[in-house]
Amino acid sequence: MRDVNAELITEAIAQLCVEANRVLPESLENCIRNAVETSPVSRPVMEDLCSNLDAARELGLSICQDTGMAVVFAEIGQDVHINGNLTEAVNEGVRRGYVDGLLRCSVVADPIRRGNTEDNTPAILHVSLVPGDKIKLTVAPKGFGSENMSRLKMFTPAASREDIIGFVVDTVKKAGGNPCPPVVLGVGIGGDFELCAKLAKEALCRDVSIRNKDPYYAELEQDMLSAVNATGVGPQGFGGDVTALAVNIETYPTHIAGLPVAVNVGCHVTRHKSVTI
């Protein structure tokens, strides 16, 4: 059994919050920089997005003013004993990262009565037990311009492959320019109501250069991406070729009577950063 002090988790989370908000994953940045946009209106938009990435890196600023709600995935090894409270350690890390890192605090204490918590806590924390004696932490700041455009539909097993693609495409069309396209789409298929949504969020945390390991779903990812880009929504909703940069699908077995599908929309700065301690 390996002992891990909760303070190490706090320090790691604080650093991840800052780094994730300032620098995009390399593969996603490459997608933005290498995207081929033929529209004379939207081509300069893509160039501006690249300039924004450069400025954030050079000035040590966040890529987007919406530094999001902190979503944290903690994979805890079964041979790890944490000295301290995991949830408190994570939230303290978020507090330090956002306050000391001068990141915008966007979390309200009550969903209806509101009231800013002033430190971007509490985080959304997903914990899973895995083999081993390590802890993998992933911080995925999620802005709500894109989160608000996400959808979930409880299909029946009669739904076809084309129906599912159509739902993803319709989600992007309805979103228009609101999620700051070009978007990254996380698609969850299977499980039940709540797991389907979690799968979609997890899909956004997969490197955009990595396709689903199942060839069937890898092909479906590509078909969805092509269908979404055919909508012509374009960068920032101004029309054009590049509406989405990637589609990532995650799946799980489901009930004989169901076929849940969730689409978690990520903006062009779909951020995530991981560390193992």
Image (cartoon, grey):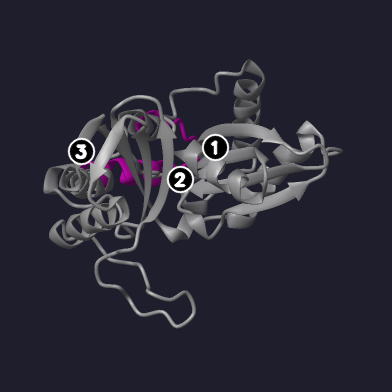
Which amino acid does the dot numbered 3 rest on?
Val
Most foreground residue, 102 or 70: 70
Q: What main secondary structure does the magenta stretch of the protein show? A: helix
| Residue 178 in view | no
* Among numbered discs 1 and 3, the one appearing first in the sequence: 3
Residue 186's quadrant in the figure?
A: top right
Which amino acid does the dot numbered 1 rest on?
Asp
Which amino acid does the dot numbered 2 rest on?
Ser
Q: Do the residues labelled 3 and 2 touch (CB within 8 Å)?
A: no
* Among numbered discs 2 and 1, the one appearing first in the sequence: 2
The alpha-carbon separation of the residues under discs 1 and 3 comes to: 48 Å
* Among numbered discs 3 and 2, the one appearing first in the sequence: 3
Residue ranking furthest to the bottom: 113
Q: Name the residue under label 2.
A: 42
Identify the residue at image location x=43%, y=39%. Answer: 128
Q: Does the magenta stretch include residue 52?
A: yes
The alpha-carbon separation of the residues under discs 2 and 1 comes to: 9 Å
Q: How crowded is mark 2: few (under 14 residues within 10 Å), some or many (20 or more)?
A: many
Q: Give the position of the C terminus as an image quadrant.
A: top left
Residue ranking furthest to the front: 1
Find residue 6 and name its label. Answer: none
Q: Does the magenta stretch include residue 237?
A: no
Q: Name the residue under label 1.
A: 241
149 on left or right of 191: left
The region drawn magenta spans 33-54
Closer to the eye: label 3 or 2: 3
